[in-house]
Amino acid sequence: MLTYKNPKAKSCVVCERVFVPWSSTQVVCRQSCAMKKARADRLAAEKAEKEAFEKRKQALKKIPELIADAQVAFNAFIRERDKDKGCFVCGRPFTDKPGQVQHAGHVRSRGAAGHLRFNEDNCMGECEGCNGPHGAKPHQIKAGAIARIGQERFDALENDNTPHKWQRDELIAIKATYKAKLKELKK
């Protein structure tokens, strides 16, 4: 003769109400809790799928795309860091007016000195007018940079011609570093 054990009382995983299950696999006390649990499970699965998709998408990015992502994070940090200092070339404060919008201007251009694109001494807050194609002249940029960072650091910047090949992990780390620095600045 078979004997069945009386089921032990459990706590509902949704509402934490104590109930006596009719099955050993039952984890919720009633239909409404079962619907809430199903919805939560579905949302968790969708979130996990979305995170996995984003991870796969990041793994497929090429170096130029990673450089662009890191540059966006770096420039946002520079803009926040220098927002109250004004343009390093002409000294005007930044506003929302055309020509006075803040950019992250490089002393040595990214095209001429790509290895310095993420160097904080090489990049400063610059107004749209000075950073544009008909903007500041090289001697004005040099004078503004020396005034902001000093002659010694400017000379080190000018003399740095070390070639650099950007690596995937390095660019991901740069992006994360500058996002964290920006978050810290905004506090």
Image: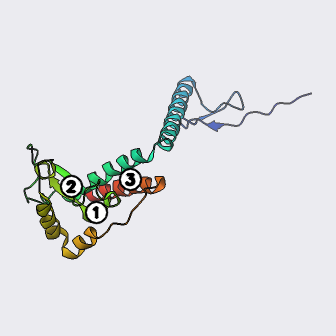
The residue positioned 35% from the left and 53% from the top of the image is 179
Residue at point 28%, 63% (across, down): 120
Q: Which residue is rendered at x = 33% and y = 57% of the image? A: 114
Q: Please identify the quarter of the rendering in which residue 84 is found.
A: bottom left
Residue wearing tag 3: 175
Q: How many marks?
A: 3
Q: CA distance from mark 1 to mark 3?
A: 14 Å
User: Which of the labelled discs sits on residue 120, or is there none?
Assistant: 1
Locate the C terminus by quadrant: bottom left
- In front: 28, or 167? 167
Q: Give the position of the N terminus as an image quadrant.
A: top right
Q: Secondary structure at mark 3?
A: helix
Q: Does residue 187 appear anywhere in the picture?
A: no
The one of 45 and 165 positioned closer to us in this rendering: 165
Mark 3 or mark 2, earlier in chain: 2
Of pointers 2 and 1, the one earlier in the residue sequence: 2
Distance of label 3 from label 2 (alpha carbons): 18 Å
Q: Residue at x 20, y 70 (%)?
A: 149
Q: Amino acid at mark 2?
A: Gly
Viewer-nearest of labels 1 and 3? 1
Give the amino acid at mark 1: Glu
Crowding around mark 2 (Cα neighbors within 10 Å: few <14, some 14 to 19, many 20+) is many
Q: Which residue position holds label 2? A: 105
